[in-house]
């Protein structure tokens, strides 16, 4: 017998198979997703369909398709496919058989032994049914593994030391949160809560309702009244829009000729925004947070007692989920193993160990740094031009593309400077400036104009940044070619020094950082900052150089602010008020690259100082 053992996540919505291959644990299978929809069907022509093809026919021929069979495992219920009847084990066996075939094709050897995962709350009857399904598929089930344990193994918590972790698992149709301790081979589930009927499918349903409602509003037709094919198309569109909203601030749904009325095709074209979508799903997301609190309570723990919170299941890609968890627990949830593959990968770790390979955890390419642009926001109740939060967060699996929206800050604004940073500090100036570019010819608008910043980071460490004016689609782009390389002291010093040069406002540049930057820059003897740091990053983008008048005015602005600060307390109340207001005007003019406003504010501050210093 071969010593091959595979690990299988037999999921409610999707299933995957993983095994040791080419020196590491990998998920196997065709296509980029390597996920098999847990759907089985029989086509009207009598052909057996497993996976994607079954899922495709599901809305049109529901009576010929089975999904979510996992919910019925361990029961004596049967399911019908056309004229035939099957037990839940038989349906699961068909899914397992397909996965084993995927693995056989990729590994070039027969698959006979498997580790299969099940939810922690599965009863003995459900576990036995899973074993039976394996046997029916011709597999020896060498171990039934709890899903939270599998996830912990994938994240490297099966190293023998004692760890306590929370596993938050939100899939397509189920939600579970478990708190487990792992030590050596012993895993104890301290508490678990969940909802067997909550998941990403509910998010799809809410979106579908919105789309159907919109179609009804526009054309007076309810698609649920007998327009099955059109409804199926909208359902796909809803899921695709949901996935897009995990990475972008908008998703456009454009479905042509959904139905025809009096020979006229009727379309649906609408844009969904992330805030609207988040409002829609918030009650569901909140309900999962209640389970998190209950699980912690039952385990007698506080979030601080946990070594980690692990995100598992495709629906945890929804950014609202990680955000709520972060806000409520104060713990940054870990997402560094693909959430929809991580249970299979963990099963693969155990399977590989049982097959005699020395595997500690799975290897995933992740970004070691966070990246994002600075923006004009508020800090300590004051406007601040260098607010920052990352668009791509540290430890995100690669490749990744994410976008966020920003808005112009005053009516008629047609230009914006985009500065891209590497780091996590909410003050951009404490991070490392990687590159910048100037966007001009924006449409002048009365209301804030939306500019999207899209960032893509690939496995080679190439960071693509685009600024896109939402209303026109006009875009500008730069490529930063070495975003993942650790910066040398020299480069950090150079980048910091450059920040000083770029931003004239003393307020915007904390004293201690400036000193440190100067010192290191001197130590490193930086000869030519512009050429050394920035040239390499101007691959495609044109960075418009600042004109010398602007740089001069900014320099003067810095000097005036520095001179005026120590005098503030000696000034008359009115002068002080004016000086503080001028500081703010300068700050905002610099952020907007508004040379006229800057020149005027500098002139006023110069005059005020002349008057104050002379008195
Ligand atoms: P799982 O049961 O873990 O395979 O998760 C499947 C669920 O994850 C389905 O509801 C998918 O629509 C959902 N899902 C997959 N990718 C994403 C994504 N990028 N954003 C939001 N949900 C997703």
Image (cartoon, helix red, strand yellow):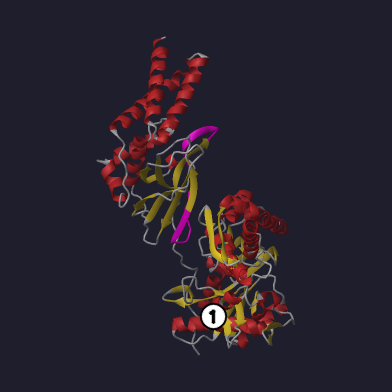
In percent of width and height, residue 353 lies at 51, 76
Magenta residue check for 125: no
Question: How many numbered marks have been drawn onto this rendered protein structure?
Answer: 1
Q: Residues within 10 Å of mark 1 (few under 14, many from 20)?
A: many
Residue 304 located left or right of residue 533: right
Residue at 38% in and 41% down: 441
Q: Which residues are magenta?
A: 379-402
Please say whether residue 11 is visible from this viewpoint: yes
Q: Nearer the viewer, residue 132 or 347?
A: 132
Residue 324 against residue 36 in the figure, above or below: above
Where, quadrant-wise, is the C terminus in this rendering?
A: top left
Residue at 45% in and 32% down: 588
Q: Nearer the viewer, residue 367 or 278?
A: 278
Residue 290 located left or right of residue 556: right
Q: Ligand 1 is found in which quarter of the picture?
A: bottom right
In percent of width and height, residue 358 lies at 47, 74
């Amino acid at each position: 017998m071969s010593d091959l053992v595979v690990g299988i996540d037999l999921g409610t919505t999707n299933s995957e198979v993983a095994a040791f291959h080419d020196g590491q644990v990998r998920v196997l299978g065709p296509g980029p997703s390597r996920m098999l929809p847990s759907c089985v069907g029989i086509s009207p022509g009598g052909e057996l369909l497993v996976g994607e093809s079954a899922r495709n026919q599901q809305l049109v021929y529901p009576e010929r398709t089975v999904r979510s069979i996992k919910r019925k495992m361990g029961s004596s219920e049967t399911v019908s496919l056309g004229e035939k009847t099957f037990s839940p084990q038989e349906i699961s066996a068909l899914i397992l058989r397909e996965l084993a075939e995927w693995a056989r094709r990729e590994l070039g050897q027969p698959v006979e032994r498997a580790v299969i995962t099940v939810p922690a709350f599965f009863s003995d009857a459900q576990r036995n049914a899973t074993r039976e399904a394996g046997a029916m598929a011709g597999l020896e089930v060498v171990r039934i593994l709890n899903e939270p344990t599998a996830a912990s193994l994938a994240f490297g918590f099966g190293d023998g030391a004692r760890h306590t972790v929370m596993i938050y698992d939100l899939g397509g149709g189920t939600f579970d949160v478990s708190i487990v301790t792992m030590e050596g081979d012993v895993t104890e589930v301290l508490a678990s809560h969940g909802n067997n009927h909550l998941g990403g499918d509910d998010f799809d349903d809410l979106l579908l309702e919105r789309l159907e409602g919109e179609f009804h509003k526009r054309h007076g037709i309810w698609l649920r009244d007998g327009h099955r094919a059109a409804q199926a198309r909208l359902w796909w569109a809803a899921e695709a829009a949901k996935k897009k909203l995990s990475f972008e601030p908008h998703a456009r749904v454009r479905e042509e000729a959904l139905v025809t009325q009096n020979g006229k095709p009727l379309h649906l074209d609408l844009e969904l925004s992330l805030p609207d979508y988040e409002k829609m799903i918030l009650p569901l997301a909140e309900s999962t947070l209640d389970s998190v609190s209950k699980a912690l309570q039952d385990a007698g723990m506080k979030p601080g007692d946990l070594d980690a919170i692990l995100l598992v299941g495709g629906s945890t890609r929804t950014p609202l989920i990680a955000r709520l968890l972060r806000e409520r627990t104060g713990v940054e949830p870990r997402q560094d193993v693909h959430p929809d593959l991580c249970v299979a990968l963990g099963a693969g770790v155990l399977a590989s160990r049982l097959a005699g390979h020395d595997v500690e955890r799975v290897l995933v390419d992740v970004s070691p740094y966070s990246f994002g642009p600075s923006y004009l926001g508020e800090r300590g109740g004051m406007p601040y031009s260098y607010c920052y939060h990352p668009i791509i967060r540290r430890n995100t699996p690669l490749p990744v593309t994410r976008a966020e929206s920003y808005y112009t800050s005053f009516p008629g604004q047609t230009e914006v400077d985009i500065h891209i940073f590497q780091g996590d500090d909410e003050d951009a100036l404490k991070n490392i400036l990687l590159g910048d570019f100037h966007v001009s010819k924006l449409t002048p608008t009365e209301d804030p104009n939306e500019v999207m910043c899209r960032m893509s980071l690939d496995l080679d460490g190439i960071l693509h940044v685009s600024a896109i004016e939402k209303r026109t689609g006009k875009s500008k782009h730069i490529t930063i070619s070495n975003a993942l390389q650790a910066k040398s002291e020299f480069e950090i010093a150079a980048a910091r020094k450059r920040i000083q040069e770029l931003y004239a406002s003393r307020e915007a540049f904390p004293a201690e950082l400036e000193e440190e930057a100067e010192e290191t820059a001197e130590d490193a003897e930086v000869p030519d900052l512009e050429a050394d740091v920035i040239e390499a990053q101007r691959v495609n983008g044109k960075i418009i150089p600042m004109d010398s008048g602007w740089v001069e005015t900014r320099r003067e602005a810095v000097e005036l602010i520095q001179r005026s600060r120590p005098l503030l307390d000696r000034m008359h109340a009115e002068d002080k008020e004016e000086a503080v207001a001028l500081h703010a005007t300068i700050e905002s003019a610099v952020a907007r690259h508004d040379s006229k406003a800057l020149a005027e504010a500098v002139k006023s501050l110069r005059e005020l100082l002349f008057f104050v210093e002379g008195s």
